[in-house]
Image (cartoon, grey):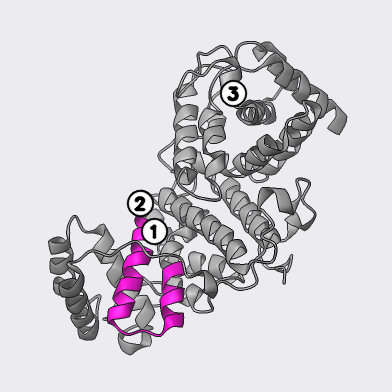
Amino acid sequence: MLPSAAICEGFGTVMNNRLGQMTLFQDTGGDPRGAASQFADVLTVYGAIGDAACGNPPGLALRKASTAVSLARVAECEPHECDAMYFAGLLHAVGAVGNPAYRKDERLSERLARMESWDTPSMGAQICEHIPALPAQTADIVRWQAECWDGTGYPDQLRWHGIPRPAMLLALADTVVRAADPEEALTAVAMQSGRAFSPDMTRTFTMWFHVSGGEAETAEPPLEALRDVSAASTLALMDAIADRIDKHNGDEGRWRRVERLATASAALLNVDATENERLALAVRLYGAGEIAKSQQSEASFDPLARLGIDDRAAHAVLAAKLVEENPTLGRAAAVLRARSEWYDGTGKPDGLFHRAIPAAAGLLAAAIAYDALGHKDRIDTAAGTQFDPQTVRAVLEAARTRA
């Protein structure tokens, strides 16, 4: 069963996607676990993007998910609660993507930014509600993960037993993963007993701490808990993430413009299927590299100038790191990393030269630059230096054809 096109912004528009659903995410031949595994891989990257948006350390979402599941087992939660807690931990910060407190080019006072950040859990819950494959409780756990036992939390100021137990366990997990070491976590939870955490939760944590030593093994995603996933729904989720990244970065619709141009250019160059697939993934993910508010926007620099190349390279490296260990999306890492390389070998981060630059990376870089240029024909001046001359000719021809 495919998700409705009305479910969330951009979620259903890929049902007639130009690149085809079965090449970007492989048809698993009816194997539900294979399809669920691909979907879970995309969710994992979404969680990592959420962490990047709000400045969390890399990998925090996965550690939080694993710790929540470990705590839930000690608390003897029901299996369906454990499943929902895993995905809530994974997606705990996705509400930061698009939140004004973290969005690029927002100019908020410190007080207003703090107030906006309090909406992160509720925005995350709305996102989770619009991903039909997730366990039913996931959105509620994300929404109430920052509530406090004494009623001073947010966004709804719930207190006492009005806070669902899975949400309190996720809050405990957050304290654990943010502590410098297990002993610091033990002290932090003890000091917040009766305020952030109920006495029962404190006892659960103490039991878990003595059993586990304050460390949780990395949990495997509960694939059986994901509902009605397919190559099409995975691609739909991927597109929705890309749309939200563009909104966060202040350039809505950018990846779609770049994708149309890059795909048409690749066709003119007879790029093979494997490279087309890597291009299709990279075009959806490159904006994640500039998601952190502290980093410059791509629009801050002339796309054909060397000024700003360090920032573009930093964006490329970050985007690659977000996916490089991901079984499904990792094949795009080399393309993402290389999209700030120059054809003449003077680019960054690795100084790749000519054919050492993946074809998909060259196409992606040229399409991004063309999209950003005010005078489009200026891209011709970068042929042979920044871009492969054949790529430039293909981009100009594709643009003329589309016009």
Please name the residue that numbered disc 2 is placed on: 56
Residue 107 position, x and y percent, is 45, 45
Dot 2: element: loop
Q: Which residues are magenta?
A: 60-87
77 vs 38: above or below: below
Dot 1: element: helix
Which residue is found at the position 67% from the left and 38% from the top?
274
User: Does the stretch in magenta take in 85?
Assistant: yes
User: Does the stretch in magenta take in 32?
Assistant: no
Q: How much space separates mark 1 and mark 3, taking CA atoms?
A: 33 Å
What amino acid is found at the position of numbered circle 3 in the picture?
Pro
What amino acid is found at the position of numbered circle 1 in the picture?
Ala
Please name the residue that numbered disc 3 is placed on: 303
Placement of the C terminus among the 4 image quadrants: top right
Which residue is found at the position 34% from the left and 61% from the top?
218
Circle 3 residues within 10 Å: few <14, some 14–19, many ≥20: many
Residue 161 position, x and y percent, is 33, 89
322 vs 335: above or below: below
Residue 99 visible here? no
Numbered-mark total: 3
Residue 256 position, x and y percent, is 70, 43
Dot 3: element: loop
Which residue is found at the position 49% from the left and 22% from the top?
309
Asked if the residues shown at circle 1 and circle 3 are in contact, with their CB atoms under 8 angstroms apart, the answer is no
- N-term mark: 3 or 2: 2
